Amino acid sequence: MIPDSLRQLLDATKGQREAEWQGRRVLLFNTAWGELAVSLQGAQVLHYLPFAPATGRAADARPAPGKEDGWLWVTPTPQALPGTIRGGIPVCWPWFADESPDGRGPMHGTARQAEWRLDGVDDEDEGVEVHLSPTAALDEQLTPRVMIHASAQRLHVELITEHRGETPVKLTAALHTYFAVAHVHQCRVEGLAGARYLDKRRDFSEAHQQGELGVRGPLDRIYESNRPVILDDGERRLRIAKQGSDSTVVWHPDSQLPGDTPAEAGLHFLCVEAACTRVDPVWLVPGAQHLLATTLTREDLAQ
C-alpha cells in the first residue's frame, strides 16, 4: 500500500532505475520476480511486491482498488525533507526510540535522516541484492551498512554494525517494519503467547502475553522474544523471522495518529519490528560486528 505517485513511478519502470520521489533519490526495480523500491534517505525499503514465481506481471497491470499492492505500507502524505518518510522499513540506528546516549538525539537515531550511497547491485533472474552505506560518518566509533535481498519468495534486510573505534559501545537498533494490512483491528500476531513484554503506554510496566495477540486498540509493546511470528490480517498470513534480536516491538497508535498520517490510511498498517532495545542492548567491543536482520515470507512459502 503505497502512494499513487510512487505507484506511477514503478509502473513506468522496466528493470532497474534510479528516480526522484518526494525530493529523495529512490532505487526502483520492476522485474519478472516482482517490485522493490528503496529510498537512499535512510536506506529505507519503501515497497516490496513479489510476483508469482516465473509468471511476472504485465507492465500496465494494476491491482484493483482495495486489493494487494505490496506487503509494506507508506503514508500517502510523507513529510518534506529534511523529515523522514513514515512507512516501509525505516532503519533505526544507533539507538532505538528516544534512547540516545545524551537524551537529546533524534527519535530512532541518525541513520533515518542520513543520505546513503549505493555500493553495489547483484541483479539476477531470481532476485536482486542491494548494498548500501552512509555517505558520511554517523557515529564516532560505529559504522553501519545495509543489505537488501528481494525475490519472488522473500524479502530479507540486514543491518550490519562494525565497531572501528577503541572503547566498548552500547547499541540499540530496529528494523521498524510497517506492514500493509486490510484493517488493523482485524490483525492477529501469532507466536508471542507467553512472552514477557514491557508496555510503553503504561510506563514500561511488565506483563506476559495471554494467548495470541489481537489488535483492538493502541499498542506499544516490547516483547522479549526471538521467535518468528505470523501476522494474519484476515486476508494474508506473513511469516516474520529475524536474527540478532531478542525484542519484537508491536506498535500502532490507533486513533492517536501522527500528523503525517491521515485517519483512513492509519487503519491499514501495523508495525512488527525486529529490534534490540533496552531489553536486549548490544555491547560491541572494538573489532566486533553485530547483525540485525528480518526476513519476510508468505507462510505457505516459509522454509
Image (spheres, grey):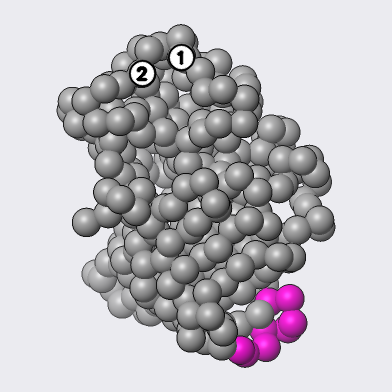
Q: Secondary structure at mark 1?
A: loop
What is the spatial separation of the Cα atoms under label 2 and label 1, in whole angstroms?
Answer: 7 Å
Instruction: Locate the N terminus and report the quarter of the image it occupies.
Output: top right
Q: Nearer the viewer, residue 284 or 286?
A: 284
Three-letter amino acid code at the position of disc 1: Ala
Q: Which residue is mark 1?
A: 61
Residue in the image at 41% along x and 33% along y: 49
Q: Secondary structure at mark 2?
A: loop
Q: Nearer the viewer, residue 121 or 298?
A: 298
Q: Position of residue 29 (x, y in %)?
A: 37, 24
The magenta stretch is 200-207
Q: Is residue 177 visible?
A: yes
Q: Which mark is residue 155?
A: none
Q: Which residue is mark 2?
A: 57
Q: Is residue 254 above or below residue 116?
A: below
Q: Nearer the viewer, residue 118 or 147?
A: 147
Label 2 CA crowd tier, 10 Å (few <14, some 14–19, many 20+): some
Q: Position of residue 296 (x, y in %)?
A: 37, 51
Residue in the image at 62% along x and 31% along y: 66
Residue in the image at 27% along x and 67% along y: 289
User: Is 22 a magenta residue?
Assistant: no
Q: Is residue 206 above or below residue 109?
A: below
Q: Is there a contact, CB below 8 Å, between mark 2 and mark 1?
A: yes
Q: Is residue 4 above or below residue 173?
A: above
Q: Position of residue 241 (x, y in %)?
A: 35, 62
Q: Position of residue 61 (x, y in %)?
A: 46, 14
Three-letter amino acid code at the position of disc 2: Arg
Extreme front residue here? 234
Question: Which quarter of the figure has residue 206?
Answer: bottom right
